[in-house]
Amino acid sequence: MSIKGKAYIGGVFEHPIREATDQSTPQLHAECAKGALADAGLIRDDVDGYFCAGDAPGFGAMSMIDYMGLKVRHMDSTETGGSSYILHVGHAAEAIAAGKCSVALVTLAGRPRQMRGGGLGGGRAMGPSEAPEAGFENIYGGTTHNVYGMCAMRHMYEYGTTSEQLAWIKVAASHHAQWNPHALLREVVTVEEVLASPIIASPLHRLDCCVITDGGGAVIVVSPEVARSLKRPLVKIIGSAEAPKGPRGGGDLDLTFSAGAWSGPAAFAEAGVTPADIKYASIYDSFTITVLMQLEDLGFCAKGDGGRFVADGALISGIGKLPFNTDGGGLCNNHPTNRGGITKVIEAVRQLRGEAHPKVQVPSCDLAIAHGTGGFLGARHGAATLILERE
Amino acid sequence: MNDQPRPATRKIPAPAINNESRPFWDAAREGRFLIKRCRACGRAHWYPRLSCPFCFSDVTMWEASAGEGAIYTFSVMRRTDGPSYAIGYVTLDEGPAMLTNFVDCDLEALEIGQRVRLRFQETEGGPPVPVFAPA
């Protein structure tokens, strides 16, 4: 059984806020839900499935379901960090295909900018203390920055990848962000400016890192029958897959690839398309190295060729061969509550509907990918891949 | 920035200990570095657990490691509010790779492939933890 063609994206919403000084986190979830329902042309009581992850305050999905007054017959709070929401869309398609729900709501929201202070400079520290690895790993000062930095260091060692090549990823994101009035960072930057920014965790510079923003987003996944009843372009889910990866007992450690090396090919196989067919790519950009490794793992280029692939503006819409993150991505636009998965789905839907900013809209965009890595790229992480088609 | 002088090295918190990991930490207090090896498949693994992560056998045995290996990768964390430090993975000569810190070294001079040797570093109220320095 496949989910291909069994579900559609009915509505999406990205909260315009980037600094939520007055809102509560539950309120932001509800505002995102309302925005996505309005985008779809649905109402709250149409929702019969709810999906959320670790950012949702309270007891699994129950607190937010109760807060929003949802009446659902299916719920899923699978947690894979920032990739959760890409995975949720796939799970929602599975639930819809199985008849478990017909209008699934996915929400993400949070306020990390209001909760900063000292510590790790906004980066997340590794793991809860009850985790089996905690005693042997959490003592070493691992944060998102340096655990991703370790991957970049090894990738450079094995494949000759350079900081200049990584910088091109940020440059491309900044070219797109200049057209997004909501983007946190709208200034176009150069390779030289990325390299001149201070080292945060070698070899990653400050401008290799994503932004920290408050806010959130929501996605509505619907059955084919509901999709055809809506007055929105039809964005069909044709492939999805997920995969976990960890240090695997320390045997044959290889930090030069991500779990996307498994989820990517599985999603492409289900969709029956290849990377060469993709017109637009939403690629999780917690750090520049995340993008580079995922592009290799998804098969857009051979392992080790990512640096050459992304250089010279190859990811800039209208210029390069693979337009990516045309909203400015997590590197420039928005990385709400340190989780960028939902904005990856949202911008892919905008592109497929022809609703991206005219300066970055990909012509005849009928096939897109949204892919993410959640957690710690150089330790335990979860990948999710989604392939979407304009019908 | 406050007026306190910056400490030269990062303080390491006490590790979380449970019944499964207690023998490791008891040995660490005595200066012995243990790893686990599976009797069924013969492979050593890290971090130590009751069941082998490779073959899922329950017959895993503690053994003393020589505490020598090579840097697989690392990242130097630049801090303005405390000491900079190096985190990375060491591939032990017995096979498994482990997360650790690199200490007593020039952070600028670390290299992948560099030979390193274990030492134990004191923690804040717990047993000492394994870290590595250039061999």
Image (cartoon, helix red, strand yellow):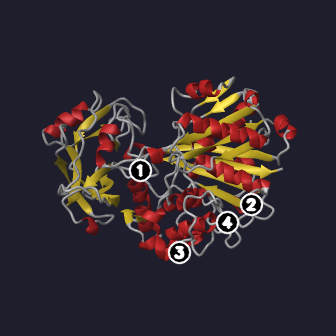
**Spatial CA span between label 4 and label 1:** 29 Å
* Marks 3 and 2, the one that precedes in the sequence: 3
Q: Nearer the viewer, mark 4 or mark 1?
A: 1
Residue carrying label 2: A277
Q: Nearer the viewer, mark 4 or mark 3?
A: 3
Helix, strand or loop for disc 1: loop
Helix, strand or loop for disc 4: loop
**Spatial CA span between label 1 and label 2:** 36 Å
Name the kind of residue labelled 1 in the image: Gly
- Evaluate whether label 1 is on the same chain as label 3: yes
- Evaluate whether label 4 is on the same chain as label 2: yes
**Disc ID at residue B17:** none
**Spatial CA span between label 4 and label 2:** 11 Å
Q: Are marks 1 and 3 in contact (CB under 8 Å)?
A: no
Residue carrying label 1: A123
* Marks 4 and 1, the one that precedes in the sequence: 1
Residue carrying label 4: A322
Write down the chain letter for disc 2. A
Q: Residue at x 30, y 29 (%)?
A: B20
Q: Picture coordinates of residue A177 (x, y %)?
A: 61, 63
Helix, strand or loop for disc 3: loop
Q: Nearer the viewer, mark 3 or mark 2?
A: 3
Q: Residue at x 60, y 37 (%)?
A: A29
* Marks 1 and 2, the one that precedes in the sequence: 1
